[in-house]
Amino acid sequence: MARKFFVGGNWKCNGTTQEVKKIVATLNEAQVPPPDVVEVVVSPPFVFLPLVKSLLRPDFQVAAQNCWVKNGGAYTGEVSAEMLVNLGIPWVILGHSERRLLSE
């Protein structure tokens, strides 16, 4: 069995709606090997997850940039796994060094 490659793009805290649409249009035009060879996952800021998911070609996936450990409660600004599942987001970046530096 051949090794499958993974290409991930973390957009950090960048982009406006128009910029995100342009980035997605560029990604949609990209020539990449088929999904059995490479898995492509992009991670836009949370506010753009539904937009990117709706516009991105179906062989590319969308990831969240973070996920809170609890499903609900008084955790202002956090995003739970339950919320991500509700949005149809199958991937999440956990333990990113930038989050760890903030003691989160």
Image (tube, rainbow, N blue to C red):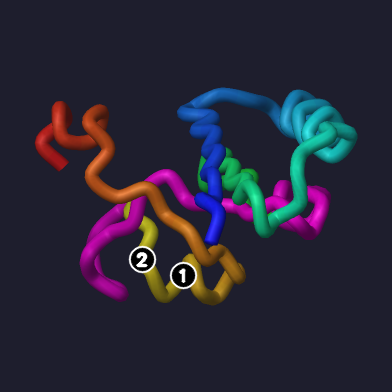
Q: Residue 80's mark?
A: 2
Tally the numbered discs: 2
Name the foreground residue: 38 vs 70. Answer: 38
Foreground: 61 or 54? 61
Horizontal relation, residue 60 to residue 49: left or right: right
Q: Which region of the structure is painted magenta? A: 51-76
Picture quadrant of residue 53? bottom right
| Relative vertical location of residue 71 with respect to residue 30 in this rendering, above or below | below
**Percent of width and height locating residue 5:** 54, 44
The residue beneath circle 1 is: 83
Q: Position of residue 87 (x, y in %)?
A: 59, 68
From the top left corner, tell me how far across and down residue 60 is, in percent.
70, 51
Q: Amino acid at mark 1?
A: Met
Within 10 Å of disc 2 (Cα), the crowding (few <14, some 14-19, many 20+) is some
In this rendering, position of residue 50 left or right of residue 21: left
- Figure check: 82 above or below 23: below
Residue 58's tag is: none
Task: Using the numbered discs, state the Cα–Cα distance from disc 2 to disc 1 in whole angstroms.
Answer: 5 Å
Q: Residue at x 30, y 75 (%)?
A: 71
Q: Are marks 2 and 1 in contact (CB under 8 Å)?
A: yes
Of the residues shown, which amino acid type is indicated by label 2?
A: Ser
Q: Which residue is at 69% across, 27% downward?
A: 16
Residue 62: percent from the left, percent from the top? 60, 52
- Kindly state the secondary structure of the residue where label 2 is placed: loop
Residue 32 falls left or right of residue 43: right
Is the residue 54 above or below the residue 41 in the image? below
Indicate whether residue 6 is drawn in magenta.
no
Query: Splitting the image into 4 quarters, where does residue 35 fall?
Result: bottom right
Q: Main secondary structure of the magenta part?
A: loop
